[in-house]
Structures are given as C-alpha cells and as structure tokens.
Amino acid sequence: MRYQMISVGEIGVHCVQPKRRRDWTSVAMCAADGGISSGQEKINKLNAQVKRKLNQAVEQAKKDGTPLDVVYAITMKPMEMGGLWAGGPIYVRRPVWPSFVIGAAGMFCAAVGAYDVGFFPTLLCIVVMLLW
C-alpha cells in the first residue's frame, strides 16, 4: 500500500492512506519513511516564524518611531535559567521528567489524604467533584 504525502501549512508533512482512515500503524510507517518531520524541525520552523515576525515588528517600530512592544522586547533577550526567565528562542525542547515528578508527587499527596480521610468520604468527594 502506498502513502500519500500531504502538506499541512508550514509546520510539517503528514502521511495518510488513500481512501482509508488513518490509523497509528500508517503514522508509524510514514514516520519510518521520513514523511513526518521531527520535533526539532517543527521547533526550528516555529522559531523562524517568530524571528520573521520580530523583524517585521522592529522595522514597523523604526518606521513609525514608536517604542517596540514589550512582547517583542522580551523576545530579543536571550532565555535565561533554562526557560525560567522569558526570552528567545521561544520554542525549545524541554524535558518531560519534571511533569512526571510533579504528577507523582500530586498522586502521592492525594493517596495519603484519601488514606487519612477514609474510602467513603474520598469516593463521595470525587463523585461530587465530577457531577458539580
């Protein structure tokens, strides 16, 4: 079976099977063929768009003689402390492990609280939160 390559904006290229519903197998096979661009390529394209818009804003501010908007001024500074302080580049690949650590800590706190309060009140609170 052959795959069609269709372009989706400037972000990347996706593969679909002709006249069939796309499934995970076709996406994986297409990615193995190189049809889907890597995450870093997408990040680079997004940063190029940001740079192009920044240059347009700087040119417009020079032409009008108005001060540069705060968003563009922050974008011109380099990012500091691993993204804690805003700056450029805007889009960067960040590690996933902090999300898992924070999620695990939250689940642990919820489990300890449920153990202290008891099964029935915890279940009642969850049901009320879902229905409210």
Image: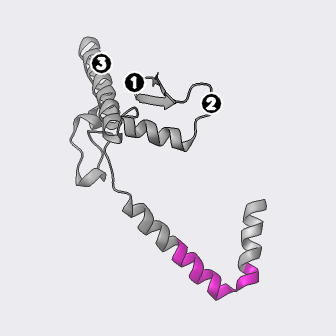
Outermost residue on the front side: it is 1
**Dot 1 amino acid type:** Glu
**Residue 10 badge:** 1
Q: Where is residue 110 in the image (x, y as percent from the top left)?
A: 58, 76
Label 3, label 2: how many angstroms apart (C-alpha)? 42 Å
Q: List the residue tagged with mark 3.
A: 56
Give the residues drawn in magenta, as a range.
107-121
Q: Mark 2 points at which residue?
A: 20
Colour basis: one colour
Please indicate whether residue 121 sits to the left or right of residue 96 in the image.
right
Residue 32 versus residue 109: which sits nearer the camera? 32
Marks 2 and 1: CB-CB under 8 Å?
A: no
The secondary structure that dominates the magenta segment is helix
Question: Is the C-beta separation of discs 1 and 3 under 8 Å?
Answer: no
Residue 27 in magenta stretch: no
Q: How far apart are marks 2 and 1 (CA)?
A: 25 Å
Three-letter code, disc 3: Gln
> Does residue 17 lie above or below 120 as drawn?
above
Q: Which of marks 2 and 1 is in front?
A: 2
Whether residue 39 is visible here, answered yes or no, is: yes
Alpha carbon distance from label 1 to label 3: 18 Å
Tell me which label, 3 or 2, sits earlier in the chain.
2
Image-based side of 35 in relation to 4, left or right: left
Residue 132 point in image, percent of width and height:
77, 60
* Secondary-structure class at tag 1: loop
**SS at badge 2:** loop
Residue 8's spot in the image, x, y percent? 47, 25
Nearer to me, 76 or 8:
8
Q: Which one is in front, 109 or 86?
A: 109
Residue 28 pos. (x, y %): 46, 42
- Crowding at dot 2, Cα within 10 Å, few <14 / some 14-19 / many 20+, comes out as few
